[in-house]
Amino acid sequence: MLNKYKLLLAGLVLGICLCGLSLDVRATNRNDYLDSLNVGVSQIVDPTGKSANEEAIQELTVVSEANGGREETDLVMANVQVAMNVRAEADEGSDKVGLLYKDCGGRILERKDGWTRLRSGDLVGWASDEYLLFGEEAESLANDVGNLIVQIETDTLCVRGNPDEEAEAVGFIPRDEELEIIEVLDDKWISVDYEGEEGYVSAEYVDIDFHIDEGETMVAIQKREEEERKAKLTANRGAVVVGGDDTRLLAALIYCEAGIETYNGKLAVGAVVMNRVRSAAYPNTISGVIFASGQFTPALNGKVARVYGGDIPESCWEAARAAINGETNVGDATHFRRAGNHEGLLIDRQVFW
């Protein structure tokens, strides 16, 4: 039942997934696997020749008729300090379809006129040869930056504190998750990096793959950046210690400025006030911020004071308490106004910046 794990240890007779550089390894039965241990486990546990990574990279070779029938690798690696553009066509003016980052690799699909069409994960496009490594140079870099990983092949895999079926479980990993290999101990146990600590998993229930980081499509980049922007807007900014009167005062201002808005609009107003309290550019108290000269009209014309002395809707109280506790949906914005001519984050009928 050691399935895919067996042939990796038997010499890493691997095939490249078209979706990336994850090398797939298969075997048929336990006897085949046990017969292979002399050339498999021995090379990984106690290498006497090439590393497991080098053995895996060797499988990235193809026979090229255009190169006189000689073997050459179809591995390509980025040779940049940060990132390089991958384009739709072999032309500097062509649309950018993604980025290939430092230490990322891919498979060569086609080469022409100083350009290489490659696949790296979901990214397919043309990259300038000026910023790529091929052949032995690509293999050398891949061996340095690539790593062996295990992929979970059962519904839930137990990670144990020691390589023993009776050892304490330190965690459970769902199917299709990946863990970086620290060491292949024998035909039964693999030590892995589990949440920064060394753990042990049964070789019977995992795939072993050789992994090189992949590029990123523009669609994926835009999605990630949008998620990061949202996360930044909602990152808790830390609670501020205040008294009950201050909470009531903030709730009153929220009612005056956003009483007819949704809860998001109310929280946004409360967050702006608390962002000012935290900022050295404004008074460091809620009352100081609210009653600062020329800032909040309802505070200056007496409306806040009247609301403060009456019944304040629970939604305004809730928004005030949340803002005081550090919640925000406007990031570190310190201003807002009714939507119109000012750019910023639009929430309900007000814009925040």
Image (tube, rainbow, N blue to C red):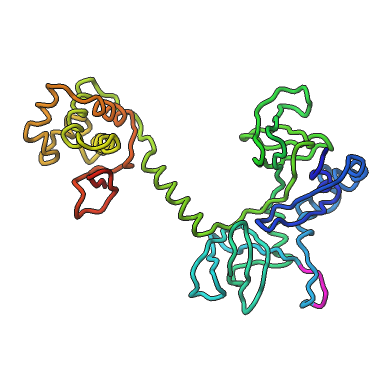
Residue 299 forms part of the magenta stretch: no
Q: Main secondary structure of the magenta part?
A: strand
Q: Is residue 62 visible?
A: yes
How many numbered tags mark residues here?
A: 0
> 10 left or right of 257?
right
Question: Where is residue 163 drawn, in percent x and y?
Answer: 77, 29
- Among all residues in the image, which is located at the extreme top? 244
Q: Is residue 6 above or below residue 105?
A: above
Question: Where is residue 87 drawn, in percent x and y?
Answer: 54, 69
Question: Where is residue 84 drawn, in percent x and y?
Answer: 54, 64
Q: Is residue 275 visible?
A: no
Residue drawn at x 80%, y 37% as measured from the top left: 185
- Among all residues in the image, which is located at the extreme bottom? 113
Residue drawn at x 20%, y 24% as measured from the top left: 248
Residue 69 forms part of the magenta stretch: yes
User: For residue 67, which quarter of the picture?
Assistant: bottom right
Q: Quadrant of the N terminus?
A: top right
Of residues 248 and 261, the one drawn nearer to the viewer in this rendering: 261
> 55 left or right of 264?
right
Residue drawn at x 13%, y 36% as measured from the top left: 292
Bounds of the magenta segment = 68-72
> 235 left or right of 333?
right
Of residues 266 and 322, the one drawn nearer to the viewer in this rendering: 266
User: For residue 302, which quarter of the picture?
Assistant: top left
Q: Is residue 172 above or below residue 213?
A: above
> 250 left or right of 187?
left
- Among all residues in the image, which is located at the extreme left? 301
Question: Where is residue 293 drawn, in percent x and y?
Answer: 10, 38
Residue drawn at x 65%, y 35% as measured from the top left: 174
